[in-house]
Amino acid sequence: MRLQRDEVTVQVPATSANLGPGFDAFGIAHALHDVVTVRATTGATQVQVTGEGAGEVPTGDDHLVVQALRAGLDHAGAPQAGFSLHCHNAIPHGRGLGSSAGAVVAGLLAARGLISEPEALDDEVVLDLATSFEGHPDNAAPALLGGATVAWMEGTRARAAQVPLHPDIRPTVLVPAERLPTKRARAALPATVAHADAAFNAGRAGLLVLALSSRPDLLLPATEDRLHQAQRADAMMATAALVQRLREVGAPAVISGAGPTALVLVTLTEAQRSVVGETWHVLDLAVDLDGGQVSVPEPAQVVRDGRLADAP
């Protein structure tokens, strides 16, 4: 295996996991993207970040995109190098919109774009490697595949499939100013759940597939949850209150991932928007149906004898 290219650009979408009852399984990709350009160099690794995370995240080999990039190259048996990265980030950090999964998927797809045999890092491999970073595949799956996804584990192997989407599924994302570390949100969850609550969520998760694909009129009951949202409410009281207000006026609102962003799976009506308040950044987003994308620069050209020709 060798590095076939020395530069690639990767685009990855923001994602929301869980979607109410689908804890650690369901996810959806939003048309809000991080864009990462990777160049192989002979010097030390350097990362330039603009947008979200600028001045906060590491700028060397300890940057998450670089760690994933190197993991992908190691898995494929490709040589390592120094790298120069430019990351333009639009995905909010610490808000439950999949910024870490996006970074991991971006690094792995960059590795795919650089190597001579990209099939060594096909979607199944990338999902597995991303899950080893993330611990669960619910955000990595839509970041990689796009659309709405259901992800699961078969032993130690991560799997995912896309859910067909009805055209009325057009998410509204409500982003607060404050952040919430995923570890803190997970720490609020109990070690066990009641059988009745597990059965309730199993039924609602099945109903959610139907609502997303063909019956958006069922989204309100399909997004009910008993496993994680109420248990995390004390860690994000404003979000929990907003989700309750929105549901009371008929909006299928849930907590996005570990929060504290709120997600509504349809466009809000004016009446529903009136209960949001002014402290939330409201984003009307299309669903990203394509997932992570890799592009390579056009071959360099030079002028020879008055004609354009590919550079050697």
Image (spheres, helix red, strand yellow):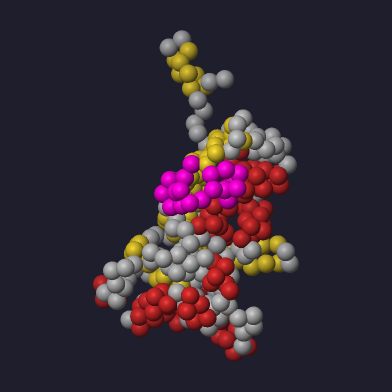
Q: Is residue 255 above or below residue 297?
A: below
**In which image quadrant can residue 273 be found?**
bottom left
The number of discs equals: 0
Q: Is residue 52 magenta?
A: yes
**In which image quadrant can residue 91 be found?**
bottom left
Q: Is residue 10 above or below residue 282?
A: above
* Residue 48 x, y percent position in the rendering: 48, 41
Give the residues in magenta: 48-66
* Residue 195 x, y percent position in the rendering: 63, 88
* Residue 64 x, y percent position in the rendering: 58, 51
Q: Nearer the viewer, residue 40 or 269?
A: 40
Q: Residue at x 52, y 28 (%)?
A: 299
Q: Which secondary structure dominates the residues rendered in magenta?
A: loop
Looking at this view, name the residue that lies furthest to the bottom: 196
Q: Residue at x 64, y 68 (%)?
A: 152
- Where is the C terminus found, in terms of image quarters? top right
**In which image quadrant can residue 274 be found?**
bottom left
Does residue 106 appear anywhere in the picture? Answer: no
Does residue 232 appear anywhere in the picture? Answer: yes
Q: Is residue 54 magenta?
A: yes
Q: Residue at x 46, y 10 (%)?
A: 305
Q: In the drawing, does residue 79 fall left or right of residue 106?
A: right
Q: Is residue 13 above or below residue 224?
A: above
- Where is the N terminus found, in terms of image quarters? top right
